[in-house]
Amino acid sequence: MSNTASAAPAPAPVPKLILGPSGSGKTSLLGSLSPACLGQEKKSGVLQLRPDNPETASLFRQGRNLIEHGRAPFQGTETLTTYEFSLSRYNTGLNRLLKGQETDYKFIMPDAAGGFVFNSGMSESADTRTIARYRGELLDILTKCDGLIICVDPNNDRGSGEFFVDLPHFLDEANVRRLNISRVLVVLTKADLYVVDQGRNAERHLKRLSPKAVGLEAMTRQTLAALQVYLPKTTKIGFCWSSIYGFLRTGEPNFDKTNQGLLFHPNSADGGIGKSEAIENWRPYQVIEPFHYIATGEVMDGSIIEFA
Ligand SMILES: Nc1nc2c(ncn2[C@@H]2O[C@H](COP(=O)(O)OP(=O)(O)O)[C@@H](O)[C@H]2O)c(=O)[nH]1
Ligand SMILES: [Mg+2]
């Protein structure tokens, strides 16, 4: 065989990791990425989403029902689940010359009930062996990954604290000195809820609120500094808003506080609206952008404020 060299498999892509306190909206964000990608081909250019394990395939299937049912149908995970998926981009222009026809980006998201990931969240129902294995896997991904998304719910001023104390603790206990992460993105989830009192002004109001200022307050500047100890000086840190429900064209959140779901959808109590109208109405706010940024380093539509 003369061309064995060219037939060698491409090296496995370095993973990107998604973390965040329990209840911060990780599963919802990932579940809604699937319908968001389907509906926004033009916006994302040529990004394609692929589940890499059965759990993720199932989550993506549930995600495609989001509009039909009007709410994120993602139950809290009872067990430790690791979601794995890939985003691939068909390169055009200069990128195509430099990187070839397609680039694959691999993402991993550990998810579990009750925080779990670190000491303070440990569930009493899980056995120590499971916890040890899980922590080992997490450490392995943390030390390998080159991009990190941290989900933070800015509406919850109590929930995130422990997580941000525990993450540096975890690294310290494991004797980690430096992570090889080139980009960290703090995603402020449930943005619709943060401005829900603004009515039709909500989307406009949100655009004026700095995700960096709100993000630093939510996670505190000190905990960011504690994390930065483990990051190279060159690591870029970004902040962005995100909402899986998004905003109607009138500017108000497409979120019904009473029913905890979309304002209008085919199965709503008042008889609902047609599916195509519901799809037309559903404009998730910056759901693709965080993943696109962590994968490529490119900021779509000014969605992300970079810090470092
Ligand atoms: N209003 C609103 N609620 C959200 C959004 N994303 C998630 N939620 C809700 O927040 C809760 C926790 O979300 P979940 O994805 O389970 O968080 P996880 O524990 O980090 O995986 C659920 O009740 C979701 O429906 C959002 O963009 N807007
Ligand atoms: Mg979850």
Image (tube, rainbow, N blue to C red):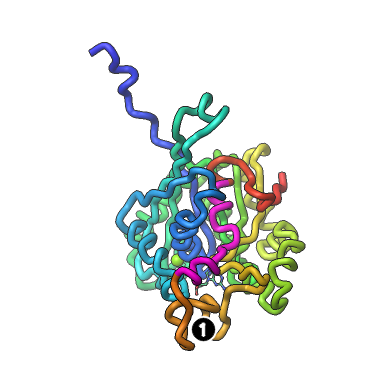
Q: Is mark 1 within 8 Å of ligand 1?
A: no
Image location of residue 176, percent across then percent down:
53, 44
Towards the viewer: 299 or 8: 299
Crowd band around label 1 with a 10 angstrom C-alpha radius: few (<14), some (14–19), many (20+):
few
> At 38% across and 62% down in the image, what residue appears?
59
Q: Is residue 156 visible?
A: no
Q: Secondary structure at mark 1?
A: loop
Could you tell whether 163 is left or right of 272 in the image? Answer: right
Image location of residue 226, percent across then percent down:
65, 52
Residue 188 sits above or below residue 141 on the image:
below
Residue 299 placement: quadrant:
top right
Q: Which residues are magenta?
A: 276-292
Residue 156 placement: quadrant:
bottom right
> At 35% across and 72% down in the image, what residue appears?
125
Q: What secondary structure predominates along the stretch shown in magenta?
A: helix
Q: Is residue 207 visible?
A: yes
**Three-letter residue code for mark 1:** Asn
Towards the viewer: 283 or 260: 283
Question: Where is mark 1, residue-wise?
Answer: 259
In the picture, the quarter occupied by the C terminus is top right
> At 64% across and 41% down in the image, what residue appears?
235
Residue 69 placement: quadrant:
bottom left
